[in-house]
Amino acid sequence: MKLEICILYPDLLNSYGDTGNSSILAHRARERGIEAEIHHVSLADTFDPKKYDVVLVGGGQFHEQSIVAADLRASKGALLKEYVHAGKVTLLICGAYQLAGDYYVDDHGNREDGLGILPVYSKPCVERMIGDIVIKDEDGTVYTGFENHLGKTYIGDLQPLGKVISGFGNNGEDGYEGCRFKNTIGTYLHGPLLSKNPELADWMIKTALTLKGHDVALTELDDSWEKAAKDVVLRKVREAG
Amino acid sequence: MTIFLTKILIFLLRLRGGGSSLPGKFALRLNKRILTKLAQGWQVILVTGTNGKTTTSDMVYKALIAEGFHVMNNSAGANMTPGIVSTFAKHHKFGDRRPNRYAVIEVDEAYMREVTSMITPEMIVVTNIFRDQLDRFGETTTTYKFILDAIKNVPSAKLILNGDESMLGNMPVSNDCVYLGFENYGEAVIAANTESIFCRDCKTRYEYESVVFNHLGAYRCPKCGHARPKLDYGVTDVMLSPKESTFLLNGDEVTVGVPGLYNIYNATTAYVVADQLGLDRSTIKNSLATQESKFGRFEKVTVGERDMRLLLIKNPAGCNQCIDTVAIDQDEVSLLFLLNDKYADGTDVSWIYDAHFEKLAAMNVSKVIIGGDRAYDMAIRLKVAGLDRMNFTICKSYDEVLEAVAKQERDLYVFMTYTAMTSFRGYLVDKGLAKKI
């Protein structure tokens, strides 16, 4: 049993610690005796959607993000769409979340086509949305992270990742954060996301292995630090009012 | 009159203790362009860039003092406009006619434009541009634009630039430029998680002949030709030790009394500034050789039988340099981490995943002590990096940290963010374990 993890553009979309999500997934798999390999796929490489069980795409700076956008449009975007629409496990964060949508409006007001992977779209906002964020999903699970984005994203009828308890979320207007589409999560949460939200990490591992035909029950890990780290953010947010 | 009132305020605040930027804010309120007046008669050297500002300024300051000049400088805590105004006001003497007065001023990158709109410096030193606390600074291209605009304000200033920094080569400015760097040092290997490796001008991935660390090295864009300029001062024959480094600079042997490749950049930069000012080379070399570790730069603090080396970490590139320097140590050591998330630390702690703590897992590590507001985030990071969680002690207070330190059988390296450094240092001073600065 082996988990094949792919990070797309780790040398370009690497500004906010998002590549840490791959290390966390691999660590949590290995702790359970499941083999895990992390594959870096960037500009010069080909992306073969069949090879991977989990694909992670993070956030980057504008300079680098514009390079990624061009590369995705030219070749890998259609393959990523095929991968996502096949129901495979994907985590799209911040810049990647925006880019995956139908379109986004850049800060000069130009409407740019997205990759059409997720039925969402984004617009720029006046002030950056920065800070700790707390959300709760429909099962009552609480997730925490750090958001830092200039884009407002609208998810239409898609299921959100959670309801915003504190922070801005997708657009600072409708009270929702992130989205779920098949087995793909789009979100603004850095932190990195999986460092303090082991529930999501395990959902990704379990789903990916199940899709591969492995019916596994993941053994419990000692997540007391993860829980404590989450509590620190919850307390901080509560104290800030 | 503004200067007089500001000096009174500085005096009053000193009686009360502290307050370095408040008088400056007050002075700026009375006269927006007060800095122009205050800087008259001083030959100003501005030092900016992400990492190395404080150490480089300190080295230049000490060399100028050793040469017998009258020199003033500011502290890292006073590197924004109000703090700089306060510093000038404090050193202002009415009717001062002394020649060869130098002001060595480190400036926060975001404040450079404002400062050069009021001061025309002799020199501007730019150390490097790394991603740094993105919640405060934004992106590296933004930082580059801040610095570029600041330079455009003062075409007569000579620029002392890190030639290995691809952001700083061949800038569209008319100033005299002096470039320093390492002559083909380091393998041409770039870690995936490195910033600024795509051409500043045309977005093509750079090719490297050699990489000193991070993205600093001999770069060339295969498409548009943006490449490292010819170095005016080149470092060769590098010898590193956990205590100091020795190298040749244009063939001249230099020893710097603080360890790490990044301190070779700092020392080289200071040497170039001094050389360009016409100082005696032996003066600057003596000064660099006796450079001592200070506030958070490998400063030594002794607790009982144990030596602790304090390291300030604030962004991935700087942290990686600390990790690499610690990794030179072959002995068994213990590690202490204090991670805070206050404004001055950067409120987003995600950056710890952009630093290569994995390298510490390859060291001979005895125990790992972890504290600070975000101790658990740090613990998770180190666990994922491959350090053995069975050796971890997580502390909820500095008392617990000190207790854990006292139990160590090995000397410690202490990695700490800015406010953790100031508060933990303060705690050690109160306990009589460290000197007050």
Image (tube, coloured by chain):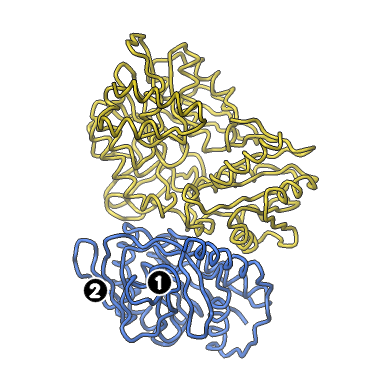
Chain colours: A blue, B yellow
Query: Is label 2 on the same chain as label 1?
Result: yes
Mark 1, secondary structure of its residue: loop
Where residue B170 appears, as percent x and y from the top left, is 29, 39
In the visual, does B47 lie left or right of B375? left
Mark 2, secondary structure of its residue: strand
Dividing the picture into quadrants, the one containing residue B8 is top left
Looking at the rendered image, the quarter that the N terminus of chain B falls into is top left
At a point 48% along the width and 34% down the height, the residue shown is B265
**What amino acid is found at the position of numbered circle 1 in the picture?**
Thr
Q: Nearer the viewer, residue B169 or A28?
A: A28
Which residue is identified by label 1?
Answer: A46
Dividing the picture into quadrants, the one containing residue B294 is top right
At a point 56% along the width and 80% down the height, the residue shown is A205
Q: Is residue B124 above or below residue A49?
A: above
Which residue is identified by label 2?
Answer: A113
Where residue A155 appears, as percent x and y from the top left, is 33, 80
Closer to the camera: disc 2 or disc 1?
A: 2
**What amino acid is found at the position of numbered circle 2 in the picture?**
Asp
Q: How many marks?
A: 2
